Amino acid sequence: MVQKLRDHMWAYIFILVPVLLFLVFTLYPIISAFMMSFQRYHVLNPEWIGFDNYKTMFADSVFYKSLWNTFLFTVCTVPVNIAITFMLAYFIFQLRTKWQTFFKAVMYLPAVASGVTISLVWFAMFDPTKDGMINSFLGFFGMEPVMWLSQTSTALFSLMLMTYLGSHGAGIILYLAAMGGIPKSLYEAADIDHASGWAKFSKITWPLLKPTTLYLLVTGVIISFQVFISVYMMTQGGPDFATTTIAYLIYQTAFMFYEFGLASAQSFVLTAIIVVVSIIQFKMFSTDVEY
Amino acid sequence: MARVVFKNVEKEFVDGNKETFIAVKESNFTIEDKEFVVFVGPSGCGKTTSLRMIAGLEKQTRGDIMIGDRVVNKLHPKDRDIAMVFQDYALYPHMTIRENLSFGLKNLKQPKDVIAKKVKDASEVLGLDHLLDRKPKELSGGQRQRVAVGRAIVRDPQVFLFDEPLSNLDAKLRVQMRVELAELHKRLEATIVYVTHDQIEAMTLGQRIVVMNKGQIQQVASPTDLYQKPENMFVAGFIGSPPMNFIDVTYENGKVMMEGAQFVLPEHSVQALRAYEGKKLVLGIRPEHLFGEDITMGVPDTYSLTSTVQVVEQLGSENLVYFRVGERMITAKLHPDSDARVGQLKKFLLDMSKVHFFDVKTEKRTSI
């Protein structure tokens, strides 16, 4: 045993560093937050209150509103964004290599910029006066200026629009890599097999891209459930909670109302929802996926 | 079934530096109806490009290709009535074997019962009937290869095209599949065009063989003719394993002279080499036409040369003995009981009735 330990000593030392980092910065905070969700938190004197935070949370209409907003945001952005990403990747894939590289770089650029910067740019674009970029565009068609971020009917949609037009770079790179991985001979065999363009797409390309689509779906849903920066920067959850998402609510509860226990409870409910939804997605889509 | 004709077909590719590379030059041949023709040659010789031009997956730069009575130059692959077995099999990985086999027929919108019958027939012929509901990744290499053949059979095409279909199989399975393909050709009575770089595959499968090198057809002939009457040094060296030996000689007054030996040629050879008086030639002799003086197999010792044995490879059925004549390493395929050993000064006998002479410049075989 000692000899074995000695043989592998360096391996254990190398592993120890990331394990320690994981224990200190990931596992401990998770356990601590979980404990906190059963406490009325105070730095010096936390009080154990059982399920009170959970009861408070489930009795709060804003919590349900934020859940609904998050759900709506996810449902309206993830599938649409995957479709947009796929179409862009499909068209880029038809181009010559140098143009592919150019468009990959261009499309990935927003991912390099910080979310705060992007939000500020969009904030300017959503300027509610007639001089705002989007409103002036609509003005060409004789439409009245819209108060994009200040009215309940358009605020959440405005945040969705941001994702439709800006967050496809990483997905495009993944799709392009997956498309490049499909052997050319499959399409040649399909050509000889009398397959039409649509048949080649629906029977070969799309099924063979399913692993990538599933990955983008799962990660997209997880990211979407945690949408925060755009809400924080542009609407602060308003107007009238129209854009309050669950992540923003957690932030508000913790850092504006200093209810850390309640915020922890909300976080664990969000975690549970993400885990359940991810499992459902894998169960539903992974059976016929070819790895 | 149908015949395939190449008339002055050429194929050029333009590389990244915009330089033109000729992959197939002035190609002319006819593959007869129901014939099994094998294209063979080293990598990059243009054999696969030729096959892909028949399939319509590459368009020829010049010339005409005919399948049956039709010029197919401008026809899409699906309209050429051909089926192709790819080197990597190109099976659709997400479909079952049944779906793979029926994919082409479904695209042709054939009735379901017809599709089911054709799939059943093909799978029975190829022994795939118990694998129909599996996916390609669940099959062995040999089974996948059969599925690829099955996908071609169900279409009942005029011409079957095979692009190095056995190259991904291990040696034992390759031999087995070779026999199966030969049987399949007999059963289907199909026109088959088969590409390989393996000359044993070519010799065993082909009724005729097209030998290619650097985009040019070197010779089109039956396996026996290729072996016994190679038109040039490339064919002589490419066909046969171990390859034919070449020895630099000079011809003078009815004699050939080489390092360490000289022979008086028989009268018919003298007549044929009259034009080469005083000139250099290359003498070609296959390893099995060289004998050790201990086991001559009835060959007279009129024509012999002596050299030191460099290497002996004992293969069980024969011994491969290597020795030098001038700069060239020569291989003799000797009887397994031969006493040849490394370092031994050994006398080798040449069966002069099997010797070829090649022109040094053109590398073409002289008329004897």
Image (cartoon, rainbow, N blue to C red):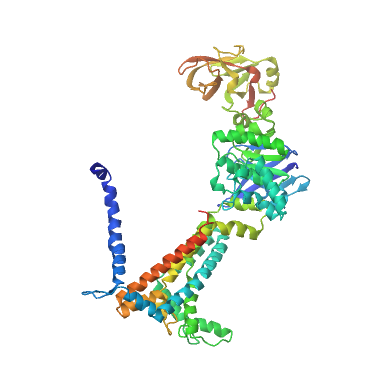
State which quarter of the image contains the N terminus of chain B: top right
Left or right: residue B119 compared with residue A182: right
Q: In the rendered image, which quarter is residue B87 located in? A: top right
Q: Is residue A228 above or below residue B360?
A: below
Which residue is located at x 50 percent, y 72 percent? A75
Q: Position of residue B119 (x, y in %)?
A: 67, 47
Q: Nearer the viewer, residue B59 or B258?
A: B59
Which residue is located at x 46 percent, y 68 percent? A221
Q: Position of residue B362 (x, y in %)?
A: 64, 31
Q: Is residue B24 above or below residue A253?
A: above
Q: Nearer the viewer, residue A229 or A122?
A: A229
- How many marks the image carries: the answer is 0
Q: Position of residue B316 (x, y in %)?
A: 52, 21
Q: Is residue B241 above or below residue A127?
A: above
Residue A104 appears in the rendering: no
Q: In the rendered image, which quarter is residue B10 located in? A: top right
Q: In the rendered image, which quarter is residue A24 located in? A: bottom left
Which residue is located at x 47 percent, y 81 percent? A155
Q: Nearer the viewer, residue B130 or B238?
A: B130
Left or right: residue A255 compared with residue B100: left
Q: Position of residue B196 (x, y in %)?
A: 61, 38
Residue B81 appears in the rendering: yes
- Extreme residue in the right direction: B69
State which quarter of the image contains the C terminus of chain B: top right
Left or right: residue A234 compared with residue B26: left
